[in-house]
Image (cartoon, rainbow, N blue to C red):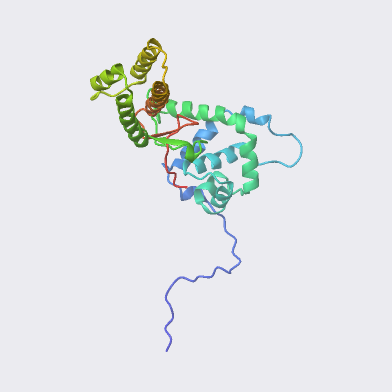
Amino acid sequence: MSTKLHTKSYSNNDRLFFLLNPNEDIAENDPVRVVDAVVESLDLKEFKKLYRERGRCPYHPKMMLKIILYAYMNNIYSCRKIERQVQRDIHYIWLAAQERPDFVTINRFRNRVKKEINNIFTQVVLLLAGRGFITLDVEYIDGTKIESKANKYTFVWRKTVEKNRAKLQEKIRVLLQQIDEVIAQDKAAETEAVEFTPETLTSFIGELKDALVSEPEPTGKEQKKVRREQKKRIKELEKHRDKLEEYDSRLEQIGERNSMSRTDPDATFMRMKE
């Protein structure tokens, strides 16, 4: 014996016509009503010049602006996604008064009002401030990450620079000890526990060159070889100075950050979710 299922009748194939009234199902304090009220209060006289007096009647700019602003509030920026919301979501259906603009129409409208949109946002901010929703006394900075055009292979890392700089300091100390000059040996001993700077190295190099000039010209083969070695080491010391200056400049540009780009010093390396 079969038992009849005790439920309300259901059939989605019935040809029923009904009138949708989303206004009854949207709370009075819902944010969508704020968007509606704000746009209704805006001065859209600049939009009139964007429309022709002939041809097919377009969608009202207030309606288009409402659904786009409400979509942006909900982190929806794709025109296709906005189109789907207008067809399915009761809040968008209410804003659009049951009109159904497709994604092409939404995109065209958005491109058409690019220049006027800045004025609209200014009006929105002033209107919200006038109603007490926001204040203009304090600025808040969020954690938005903006992707830079800098190539990921141009980034310089703080730890790498500091590590290479420490190695360079040791190379400079060893090189000064190898230079067969009393002045270089004295300077190396004095600064054994102190970090070298480009300025101190420039001073060392100048004194070493002056010492070479003051010496008599070498006559024998062995003396000439020693002189060539001394000049070679001084040139190497100059290269180390220039490299040290580069490392110091990088660290100054990085500041308190962990990385920077050589082509865009303001860019910091961040791993984007995308």
Question: In the image, what residue occupies the spot 30% across and 30% down?
Answer: 170
Task: Please provide percent x and percent y for residue 249.
Answer: 40, 25
Give the side of residue 114 with respect to residue 224, left or right. Answer: right
Q: Which of 94 and 120 is in front in this view?
A: 120
Look at the image and tell me whether residue 60 can be seen: no
Farthest-out residue, right: 54
Give the side of residue 83 with respect to residue 239, left or right. Answer: right
Q: In which quarter of the image is the N terminus?
A: bottom left
Q: Nearer the viewer, residue 258 or 214?
A: 214
Task: Please provide percent x and percent y for residue 70.
Answer: 50, 41
Give the side of residue 40 with respect to residue 198, left or right. Answer: right
Task: Please provide percent x and percent y for residue 152.
Answer: 48, 40
Question: In the image, what residue occupies the spot 55% across and 29% down?
Answer: 118
Task: Please provide percent x and percent y for residue 160.
Answer: 36, 36
Q: Which of 136 and 22 is in front in this view?
A: 136
Look at the image and tell me whether residue 150 can be seen: yes
Task: From this view, report whether residue 232 is shown above or below residue 215.
Answer: below
Farthest-out residue, front: 220
Task: Tell me where residue 268 sits by quadrant.
Answer: top left
